[in-house]
Image (cartoon, rainbow, N blue to C red):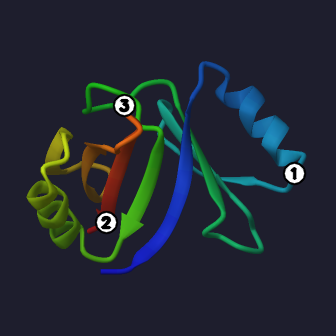
Amino acid sequence: MSIRRAMPDIRSEAMEESRDFYGLLGFEEVMNLGWVMTLASPSNPTAQITFMSRDETAPVVPDMSVEVDDVEAAYAAVCASGAEIVHPLQDEEWGVRRFFVRDPNGRVVNVLGHR
């Protein structure tokens, strides 16, 4: 299993202001579903930051997202470790398969793969 990207997820009620602010640092909007928006560096597209007002299907807003090439293997490894699954493995209508897990620091990690 390999990591494709890792990014912070920031809970925000100021989506437009966040986009404008991080635009000053060179980030550009690459995805916006209204409740979630991702900004990325045009010169390094895996350098990203996500803002979320809520999560569409999960009970919490995650603290970070990690995209992997094999989400099934990641899920199996996390389950075998006994870590707390916060949101079960499932396909989402926006084209990802994902689950949430709580890390040893209490942070919620969104682990995903694109379908």
Task: Identify the residue at image location x=25%, y=33%.
Answer: 57
For numbered disc 1, what is the local secondary structure?
loop
* Residues at marks 1 and 3 touching, judged by CB atoms closer than 8 Å: no
Between discs 1 and 3, the one toward the N terminus = 1
For numbered disc 2, what is the local secondary structure?
strand
Q: CA distance from mark 1 to mark 3?
A: 26 Å
Residue of label 1: 25
Between discs 1 and 2, the one toward the N terminus = 1
In this rendering, position of residue 15 left or right of residue 105: right
Task: Identify the residue at image location x=37%, y=46%.
Answer: 109
Task: Identify the residue at image location x=31%, y=65%.
Answer: 113
For numbered disc 3, what is the local secondary structure?
loop
Residue lying at the far right of the rendered structure? 24
Residue of label 3: 55
Q: Amino acid at mark 3?
A: Asp
In this rendering, position of residue 20 left or right of residue 102: right
Kindly indicate the quadrant of the structure image that contains residue 62: top left
Q: Quadrant of the N terminus?
A: bottom left
> How many residues crowd around disc 1 within 10 Å: few (fewer than 14), some, or many (20 or more)?
few
Residue lying at the far bottom of the rendered structure? 1
Q: Position of residue 21 (x, y in %)?
A: 83, 36
The image shows residue 93, relative to residue 46, as above or below, that is above
Residue lying at the far top of the rendered structure? 13
Foreground residue among 57 and 83: 83
Residue of label 2: 113
